[in-house]
Image (cartoon, rainbow, N blue to C red):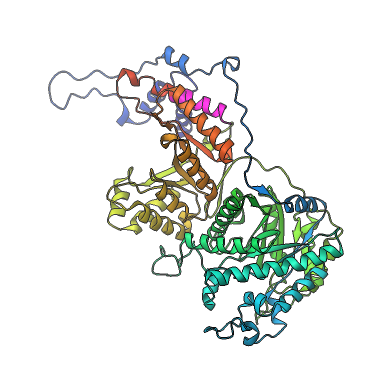
Amino acid sequence: KIDKELLGYVEDVMFNRRADATERMLDFAATLDPKSHPTQLKRKDGFGPAAPAFVATPKQNVSTVNKIAPKPASELPPVPKYAKWVDPVKPTAAFDVINKIMKERIMVIDGAMGTAVQKYKLSEDDFRGERYKNHTHDLKGNNDCLVITRPDVIEEIHNAYLAAGADIIETNTFNSTMISQADYELDKKEEVYLLNKTAAQLAKKCCVEFTKKNPAKPRFAAGAVGPTNKTLSVSPSVENPAFRGCTYDEIVEAYYEQVEALIDGGVDVLLVETIFDTLNAKAAMFAIDMFFEKWGQKIPVFVSGTIVDNSGRTLSGQTNEAFWNSMSHAKPIAIGLNCALGAKDMVPYIENLSRVADCWVFCYPNAGLPNAMGGYDQKGAEMAEDCRVFPDKGLINAIGGCCGTTDEHIKCLADMVATYKPREKHDVPDIMRLSGLEPFNYAPNEKDYRKTFINLGERCNVAGSTIFKKAIVDGNYEKALAIALKQVENGAHVIDVNMDDGLIDGESAMTKFVNLMVSEPDVAKVPFMIDSSKFHVVEAGLKCSQGKCIMNSISLKGGEEEFLNQAKIVKRHGAAVVVMAFDEEGQAATEAEKVRICCRAYKLLVEKVGFNPQDIIFDPNILTIGTGMEEHNNYAVDFINATREIKRLCP
């Protein structure tokens, strides 16, 4: 009872419900604990009479109340009409065609490549061919090189799937990155380029031939972009959880080389698939966006995650809604799931994706679950019946098959979905969606302001915690990680990390500590705020987190060009951003300056960068208000009024 009553007084202060709120709260607090009672004890120095008991008298500062009272709407300047961002990267014709088809019917994706290749019982010589005749490493099992050594086999497989009714066939490039091909010593750039371009040309040729036969059913070649055989979120060393087998930049470079070759080969779409680590997928989308910007055009991108078991999580620990929150910034034309599960087990996760995603949704499950020998026994008709639940519930716009599926399975799926209507897109609440291993969706609640406030844990900030700073300087990262964990256990929604100190190598410390946080599920479940005054340090942190982070911060201090360049990089990483009320002339102190600078930054972000307004967080600078200096007297009032006006003018 007491707690609830005190909470009411505290909320009066926090939400400025009445002018005498502070005095009333202090008066009430004094009745709760004898330690806080006014005292009649003599002074410790022994001089003078005992001080009289203090009696709080509620006062109302009329001038201050008038200063922070909202103005009538008629006296406020109108909210500016912001221009819609125009993407300088132009979409190819495939966007309109695929969007039209997915509104009208359920599209069909092809089936497994590996399963089909196994039926040919190919030898080492088949994988070597003439080009790799004298190669020093065994190549059997490297299916991707068959586009060069046995293109007839791959073409036959493509044609079988197209004949079965597939609208989309994937290039034989699941492992065609420099990183994956290193296992076969085929990781030179020219070799990887040849694999991808040749595979794209082969798949495109098959699609063109089938489209000519029936123009009413156009076929599409999808450039298959696999997850690589490395993970950016999990250490390969049990003894060193901060270690990674490769860097984010290496993954980005590998994907960039692959995407360039696939597009040079003529693919219609890209399919980033079998995502077991969302950070790898974010690196893929980072590379794709970089290439699109250079190319000046873009093709549709499908993104497909992999839920590894009935925990409903990826191998790196994310739920599928957290996965969507992490990937939605890339604006894929479609999001889905493939591999690991059969259709029956995949249903609840596709239902959830269908609920949260604002794009098309697809799935291509395995042919049931593997048997004791690792094979798949489910026949096409049985799989099609298991998959019927997806169109029955209106969950999908495309369907296909993964491990164990053949052209028989694809024909049965195509026949099954032919009579169903596709899933309709629906409006998704426009809110800030962050993620760690779990989603954090911020939706202000006007009826309960306690749900509006985000609890931001700031003890992992070397500027704010001497204990944390000492742990980092001493290299005691175990103790530093315990500080992060304690904050999450105490209710922090987001964990702030800052390494700005002259005694610390900020980039190295940020990388190591965020990698450690990612490796601790009880910490990694919440989003991170990567905090630094040095942009390269912030970016180092963003490169370590598979979740959707908050980047803290950017400002106009260095001018518009620097501001826009940094904002574009933050957007490409998929992070929300904190914008400081700071420009070329310095830090904003007055209400007018705070509003002017924040509105200027907002206009640049939404009109020049295409930043989602929901991902913009303003810091209007709360300055010291208890100095006693006359020029500081209005700081609190200016902050309150500026905050109200910024929220109104920057919707």
Whether the magenta-drawn stretch holds residue 641 is answered as: yes
Q: Position of residue 557 (x, y in %)?
A: 41, 35
Q: Mainly helix, strand or loop, the magenta region? A: helix
Q: Is residue 151 above or below residue 446?
A: below
The quarter of the displayed image where residue 228 is located:
bottom right
Q: Position of residue 67 (x, y in %)?
A: 46, 16
Q: Nearer the viewer, residue 96 or 54?
A: 96
- Write the residue at 42% across / 70% down: 237
Q: Is residue 488 above or below residue 389?
A: above
Q: Is residue 338 visible?
A: yes
Q: Is residue 115 above or below residue 76?
A: below
Whether the magenta-drawn stretch holds residue 4 is answered as: no
Q: Is residue 9 visible?
A: no
Magenta span of residues: 639-651
Q: Nearer the viewer, residue 224 or 524?
A: 224
Q: Does 14 sit left or right of 472 as displayed?
A: right
Q: Position of residue 605 (x, y in %)?
A: 54, 37
Q: Position of residue 245 (x, y in %)?
A: 45, 67
Q: Nearer the viewer, residue 343 or 153?
A: 153
Q: Does 89 sit left or right of 602 as displayed?
A: right
